[in-house]
Image (cartoon, rainbow, N blue to C red):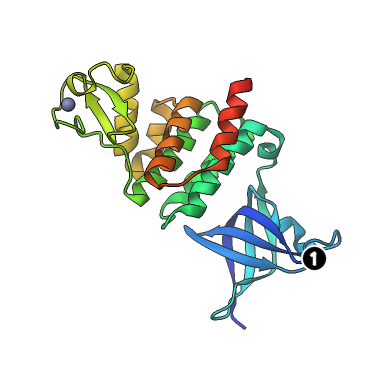
Amino acid sequence: MTSKEVSALVLDCEEYKEKDALVTLLIEDELVMAYAKGVGKLTSKNRILTQPFSSIKVFLDQKENRMPLILHGHVEKFYFRIQENLVAQSVCFVLRDCIKRSHTTLGVSSLLESVWEAFQTGEANVYTKACLCMKQLLENEGIGLYVDGCVNCSRKNHIETISLKDGGFLCSECNANFYPKRSKQELIQYYSLMRVKEDKFELFNETYLFGMDDFLFLGNWYEHYASTSLLSLRLLKSIKGFE
Ligand SMILES: [Zn+2]
């Protein structure tokens, strides 16, 4: 038996058979589906290891050609406030669903946990962090926004909006009043978002303030360019409609 302790983020937990569960974990930027035996029982010690929005340390029994089995472990941190807030939960579900559909999750786990942390502690820049996580996912898939100039004619001045259909920044001439103009500040924020490197994430989070609309915009972007449909994104949009 090969078993080692790993740090993991619990993304999702689905009931399986009578009392078992399939748990989606993010382990060092790798998406892993693990089997949790007997966690449907109230007396199960491993039950707490299957709660979404948890950071856990867990021993997995890993054998070739078989799903890793959760042996035992402990919860490092449970970001329980996300569960108490429908908007927070929906934002986290959008990220989870994108992560589950992505070909690679490189660099994603620390960004995702910073979003969880921000919701837990009620930080003002939680959407900045959520947008940063989404940017990483877009970048990994090679479907980020083109921000080096106008995506249509390549000019670098008179940029006035972002076009989902065209794939990035658009100048006033190419836009021809089709999409509403964006403020200079907004365009700078999006440029910086697409350009920021890992060693500057902290500064980025302190400098810029993104909102839920930005997160929805990037969610639409992911949906469009990854050719997928996200139920969680639709839910978040409908909740926003009621706010
Ligand atoms: Zn142009």
Q: Is residue 180 above or below residue 1?
A: above
The extreme right residue here reads: 43
Q: Is residue 65 above or below residue 24?
A: below
User: Front-most of 16 and 42?
Assistant: 16
User: Front-most of 15 and 124?
Assistant: 15
Q: How many marks?
A: 1
Dot 1 beta carbon under 8 Å from ligand 1: no
On the image, the x and y values in percent for residue 215 come to 47, 32
Q: Which residue is mark 1?
A: 18
Q: Quadrant of ligand 1?
A: top left
Q: Quadrant of the N terminus?
A: bottom right
Q: Is residue 43 above or below residue 82?
A: below
On the image, the x and y values in percent for residue 40 come to 80, 61
Instruction: Say left or right for 81 vs 188.
Output: right
Judge whether residue 76 can be spotted in this image.
yes
Q: Quadrant of the C terminus?
A: top right
